Image (spheres, rainbow, N blue to C red):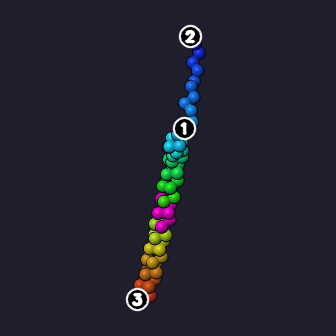
Amino acid sequence: MGSVTPWHMGNLHPVEQVLTIVLAFGPFLLLGAVILVRRRQDAREDAADRDAVAHEADRAGDDSRER
């Protein structure tokens, strides 16, 4: 039996090059975007929670002064 020689298929077509790059890096870029969006949402929710707590504390202080 003869040895098996791997054959090179030639250069990739430009569309194939783009598809290869998208498949290689796309999932990581998408994951990074999802993490960025979620962190922004969490930061907004935390800020809203802090504002609500501060507002409640102000209202409680105002109620005690009225009595």
Q: Which residue is mark 1?
A: 12
- Residue furthest bottom in the image: 66
Q: Is disc 3 placed on a helix, strand or loop?
A: loop
Disc marking residue 49: none
Residue type marked 1:
Leu
Q: In terms of secondary structure, what is the magenta stretch mainly?
A: helix
Q: Is residue 59 left or right of residue 21?
A: left
Q: Which residues are magenta?
A: 38-44
Residue furthest to the top in view is 1
Which one is closest to the eye, mark 3 or mark 2?
Answer: 2
Which residue is at the front of the view, 21 or 39? Answer: 21
Residue at 56% across, 25% down: 7
Residue 62 position in % (x across, y down): 44, 85
**Can you identify the residue that label 3 sits on?**
67
* Disc 1 residue crowd, few under 14, some 14–19, many 20+, Cα 10 Å: few
Tell me the crowding category of disc 3: few under 14, some 14 to 19, or many 20 or more residues within 10 angstroms, Cα based. Answer: few
Image height of 41 relative to 20, above or below: below
Q: In the rendered structure, which amino acid carries the disc numbered 2?
A: Met
| Residue 24 seen by the camera | no
1 in relation to 64, above or below: above
N-terminal of the pair, mark 3 or mark 2, is 2
